[in-house]
Amino acid sequence: MKFDTSIALYKEAEDHIVGGVNSPSRAYKGVGGGTPVFMEHAKGAHFWDVDGNRYIDYLGAYGPIITGHAHPHIAEAISAAAYNGVLYGTPTKLENKFAKMLKEAIPSLEKVRFVNSGTEAVMTTIRVARAYTDRTKVIKFSGCYHGHSDLVLVAAGSGPATLGTPDSAGIPTSIAEEVITVPFNDVEAFRQAIRIHGEDVAAVLVEPIVGNFGIVEPKPGFLQAVNDIAHDAGSLVIYDEVITAFRFTYGSAQEIVGVQPDMTAMGKIIGGGLPIGAYGGRVDIMEQVAPLGPAYQAGTMSGNPASISAGIACLEVLQQDGTYDYLDSLGAMLEDGINKHASTYGLPVQINRLKGALTVYFTDGEVENYDQADATDGEMFSRFFHLMLQEGINLAPSKFEAWFLTIAHTEEDITATLQAVEKVFSIMAKE
Ligand code: PMP
C-alpha cells in the first residue's frame, strides 16, 4: 500500500496545525511514529484514504460510529436539520424528545442537560457535585480518561493517600491536589482513600466499564462497593459513560453492572457522529444547575438541532431488534479467530471483549487494571498496528484503545480481517 498523498498532506498539516493533527491521539506517537492516514470518504464499515486505499474500520472514530459511517437514517436527519437551520439559540422540541429518549433508556437520569463534548459533560458533573456537597476533592481511577479539563488530567499518585500531580503542563499543582487516584478494581485501595479523604470528597468518578486502557470490566461487586462506600462518606458517584452509553446495550453500562450512579456523563454515540455531550442524574442534584441553582454551566452550541437530530436518529437505529446481539456475534467471531491465530503462531495475546468492543493486548496475563494494561507489549502492538494497516485494517493507533464494531460490519468483513490477522501474525512469529 502506498501512502504518498497522506505523507504530503501530513507535511502540509504540520506547517499549519499544531502537530499536524487536531487531537493528539490521531498522531501515530503511540505506535512508534509514522504518517497518520488521511481519510477522504467513509461508508458503512469502510474507509477510503486520499491515496485510494480501502480499509475496514475498527476505529469507529474512537467510539461514536456504532451504526457505521454515513448511515442513511442519520444522514437524512442531519441533512434535514441543515435545511431547517442548524442553530437557533432558543429551545426546540427536538431537545425535549431527545431528553425523554435518554431518560427512558437510562432511568438514573431524572434530569439532563446537553453540552458539546464528553470533556464538558464530565467537567460539569464535577462542578455540580462540588456545589451539591460543598466539598472539593474527587477520587478517580488510574488509567481512566475523563476528557481534558484540568481536574481530571491528573496522574496517579503512588498510593491511595497520595494526592495527584498534573499530567499536563499548564495545570496548577493546587488543582491536581484536589484529585486522588486509586487502581481500578481495587476495593481496598478505594476504601482507604475514602477513609483518609472522605470528608472532603465531593465525588467519585469512574468509567463503569473501562474503555480507556482497553475494555476492562469491573470485577463482580466492585462498583456496588464503590457506591456503598462513597455514599456512606457523603460523596456522590459519577459514571463517565462517554464511551459506554449505548455501546454494549441500549440501557448503557449502568444497566449491565446493575448499579445506579448519582450522575452520569455521556457523549460520543449519543451524537450520532456530531459533537455532543450530556450529563444528568438525580433531580435534587441536577437542580443545582443554573438557571435553577447556583452552579453555572452554559453553551452557545448546546442542544443544537443538528447534533440532537443526529443523536435521535442514531438511537432510533440502535432501538432495532437484535442490534446488540449482532454486535456480540461479530465480536465473538473476531475474538475467537484472533485467539486461534495467536495460538497457532505462538503469540502472547489476551483479548478483553464485551459485545462489539474489544482490545487485543500482547501479554500472557489478565488485564484488570491500568498497570497490567501498561505492562503489555507496546512494541508488538505497534508492529501489529502497522502491518494491519498495510493489509487495509484500520485500528486505533494505541495499545490502550478498543476495536469498535458497528452494525455495518459483516461476517465478510470479519473473515477478511481474520485473514489479515493470520498473515500479520505469521510475519510477527518469524521476527
Ligand atoms: N470520558 C471518556 C470515558 C472518554 O473516553 C472521553 C474521550 N475519549 C472523554 C470523556 C472526553 O470526551 P470528548 O473527547 O468528547 O471531550
Image (cartoon, rainbow, N blue to C red):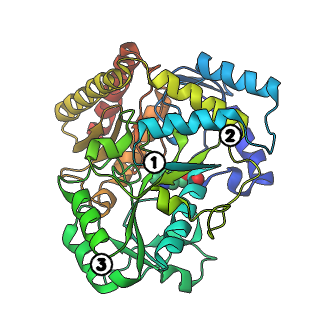
State the SS at label 2. helix
Q: Is residue 254 left or right of residue 148?
A: left
- Measure the alpha-carbon separation of dots 1 and 3: 26 Å
Please identify the quarter of the rendering in which residue 149 is found.
bottom right
Q: Which residue is mark 2?
A: 7
Q: Is mark 2 within 8 Å of ligand 1?
A: no
Q: Position of residue 313 (x, y in %)?
A: 58, 25
Depth check: 28 or 177 in front? 177
Q: Is residue 319 left or right of residue 300?
A: left
Depth check: 347 or 258 in front? 258
Label 3 Cα crowd, 10 Å radius (few <14 / some 14-19 / many 20+): many
Return the disc, 1 or 3, that comes first in the chain's sequence.
1
Q: What amino acid type should be assigned to the residue bearing mark 2?
A: Ile
Q: Which residue is mark 3?
A: 194
Q: On the rendered image, what quadrant is the C terminus found in? A: top left
Label 1 Cα crowd, 10 Å radius (few <14 / some 14-19 / many 20+): many
Depth check: 398 or 257 in front? 257
Q: What amino acid type should be assigned to the residue bearing mark 3?
A: Ile
Q: What amino acid type should be assigned to the residue bearing mark 1?
A: Leu
Residue located at (22% from left, 63% from top): 225
Q: Which of the two discs, 3 and 2, sits closer to the camera?
A: 3
Return the disc, 2 or 1, that comes first in the chain's sequence.
2
Q: Position of residue 125 (x, y in %)?
A: 52, 62
Q: Which mark is residue 166?
A: none
Q: Which residue is mark 1?
A: 109
